[in-house]
Image (spheres, coloured by chain):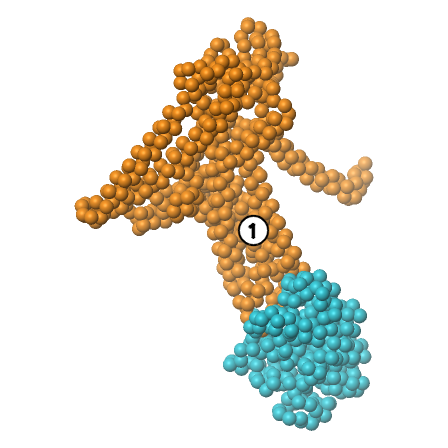
Amino acid sequence: MAGNVEIAANLNPRAEAASILESPMVEIDRLSLYYGPTRALKDVSMSVPKHRVTAYIGPSGCGKTTLLRCINRMNDLVDGVRIVGSIRVGGTDIYDRSVDVTELRKRVGMVFQKSNPFPKSIFDNAAYGPRILGVKSRSDLEGIVERSLRAAALWDEVQDRLGESALGLSGGQQQRLCIARAIAVEPDVLLMDEPCSSLDPIATARIEELMLELKNSYTIVIVTHNMQQAARVSDYTGFMLLGELVEFGVTRELFTNPRDTRTEDYITGRFG
Amino acid sequence: MRPSLAKTWRSGEPLIWLTGGALAFVLLLVAGLIGLILYNGLGFFWPKDVIRLTLAGGKIMTGQVADREAIPGQPGQSRIKLKVANRDLYGADFNWVDEAEIARREYPPDVAVIERTEWGLLVGTVKEIRDGDAVVATGSEAGWVEVRTRLPEAVRVRAEARRIETRDIGAINFAQEKIRLRLKSLDRKGVTSGPDVEALQQEMASLQVRYTEQARRLGELRKRQGASVVVAADAGKEKALPLAQVLDVYFPNRMSGPAKAWHYAVRVWEFVSDEPRESNTEGGVFPAIFGTVMMVIIMSVLITPLGVLAAFYLREYATQGPFVSAVRIAVNNLAGVPSIVFGVFGVGFFIYIVGGSIDRLFYPDALPTPTYGTGGILWASLTLALLTVPVVIVATEEGLAAVPRGVREASLALSATKLETTLRVVLPAVMPSILTGLILAMARAAGEVAPLMITGVVKLAPALPIDGVWPFLHLDRKFMHLGFHIYDVGFQSPNVDAARPMVFATTLLLLGIVVLLNLFAINLRNRLRRTYATVAV
């Protein structure tokens, strides 16, 4: 799947590995996931282009978060999960036995639905990843912390109180701190699991702005409940239903001219 | 009326009164208990006035009023309990006097209360001071002046004599015992002569010379103390008290308020810093404080790592299932086992098996005298550790369960391993819970008596578990404990009446220490909570 392969945006997700006009960062191939006997993902195939924002939408329980968590293997933590198929990040099959999970997570960062800063200072939160990777010198850490807080548009608000507890920040600030913490280790891909679901509209707008900036440096995959949000920030959107990727394509196409009736029903609000 | 009654009940008002009443009742009980202890414990040290009663029959009694009660069966009549002291002269410390018999009450200013090293208080008027057989001062005033000039010297000499006895002679004894054991060890190997034995015997002889020298110094010191104070008590009785035995002399009837307060403070300080006298009914309780605190510290050092590690395995690594649930239930129930059962286990396992083995392996020369094969502070602490470790495990487990999953996932998603997550995120977050467990464990341990009585606590320990002799920390030593001290003074003392205030004072002290330990730990926990709060927004 190297190079730019031209396939129209109205591709069938269950055909060959889905592909788009651009160079892919994450390629998912016939991925199925079982929680015990339950099949939570059904033969999902698609690819996420580099330096773009890709969104998954769909009703609750459709498997979009599960799919997201497959990309950095967070599902490994859940007992009784079995995965069939493959995911390649930057060309490497991440479910290959030789792959070190911590190496993978260095390249694929994650921001969670509920902001979850560590009960430590703002500085220590942003410096957590680099410290895990072995950065020890204070000046190096200071540089990384400032750079990542600036990238997350938080620096101006917190530069005077880096030593204070991260839990003293507002919800939106906490979520931006989590983004800063994730990008402090310079990942290739940033996974965001409904990052704005517990934020007010103003904080949400800030995070959305931030995503548009961050996509210049990172490949972003976002799961969202909010179709308007997907429409605003993403370049590509996938619609999932009951573990299936029903439709995947350029965002504007998907919202204005859905190929599948189920997609149409969902985005027009007939169910979901 | 029925519907309205039901209505009242449904309004919730009666339940509020019921719950509030229950709480008020409990608070009242606690306040009553603390009040009783405070009143009896704090009053003990106040220098009470000495009253002189002239009875209808002409008999004179001098002493401090200890109690007053109605005479059973004779309404309107009361009697007072007079602490006449002078146990060696009268045979008893206390006397009951019917108030109806009292003809005259007065507070003579020249009555002295003398604290001495033996026989409890001496109450009476100073008659004369003698040095050897010569009288150097007569009368209360001149006598008091003389006592005041001579007392500091007597105190100094007593301290010096005590230093020689405990430190110098004690060190010699210790060294001699070591040499004796080495000789015995050589003897067991069949070496009864030769250079090694001779060297040891020589060393022994030189120690003996040093001992004789110290004993001579002690004798000289004692000889220098020829002065004695003659005190006249009631019924024409007299006591010639060697000044060496006098601890303090005061005249409560002419002391001003501030002077009494100062005296009070001095006595409180003596109580917490001195060693006990008179089979624990007089003097201080310092060795018991020391023993209690040290035992709790040793126990904390043992249970914190053990309990935390066990809890981490149970919650973080063990596969949750019926077996782990059974273990959890067993651990919870362990905290409810009667403490004496732990004591019996401590004796059977720690002292006889572990201690006995240590003795056979490392101290065979001292046998049949046990070194670790008998009660000691280590075994008492270990027994209490068994008793309290479930508390730490349960508290830590609850803390671990409360660490949000999101925080762990965030760490893992930042490419941390499970170990790194545990050490850098989970452990700091669970720290306040660990301390909570430790607080509960410490409070329980400090108040426990039953298992200690059979694993190493004694009525009177000859030496503290820490001293200046190598290896400084003597974990094999027996020790004193405040809880046991209360039991001993209150119920095993030959002179219960005189010792009763001491029981309350010791109880107060024990309460104080438990509160202090708790305050320290709570303060630490709150500080940690501020730093590591895991409040998820």
**Front residue of B74 and B257:** B257
Relative image position of residue B516 (x, y in whole percent): 58, 43
Outermost bottom residue: A6
- Vertical order, A53 against B177 (above or below): below
The residue wearing badge 1 is: B437
Do we see residue A103 in this rendering?
yes
Query: Chain B hue?
Result: orange
- Vertical order, A141 against B78 (above or below): below
Relative image position of residue B78 (x, y in whole percent): 61, 14
**Front residue of A44 and B100:** B100
Q: How many labels does the image show?
A: 1
**Which residue sits at x=55%, y=64%?**
B423
Corner quadrant of residue B184: top left
**Which residue sits at x=47%, y=32%?**
B276
Q: Locate residue B475 relative to residue B530 in the image: left or right.
A: left
Residues packed near mark 1 inside 10 Å, few (<14), some (14 to 19) or many (20 plus):
many
- Vertical order, B511 against B527 (above or below): above
Amino acid at the residue labelled 1:
Gly
- Vertical order, B283 against B315 (above or below): above
**Front residue of B337 and B253:** B253
Q: Locate residue B346 relative to residue B193 in the image: left or right.
A: right
Relative image position of residue B244 (x, y in whole percent): 44, 25
Could you say which chain is coloured cyan in the image? A
Please, what secondary structure does the residue beneath circle 1 have?
Answer: helix
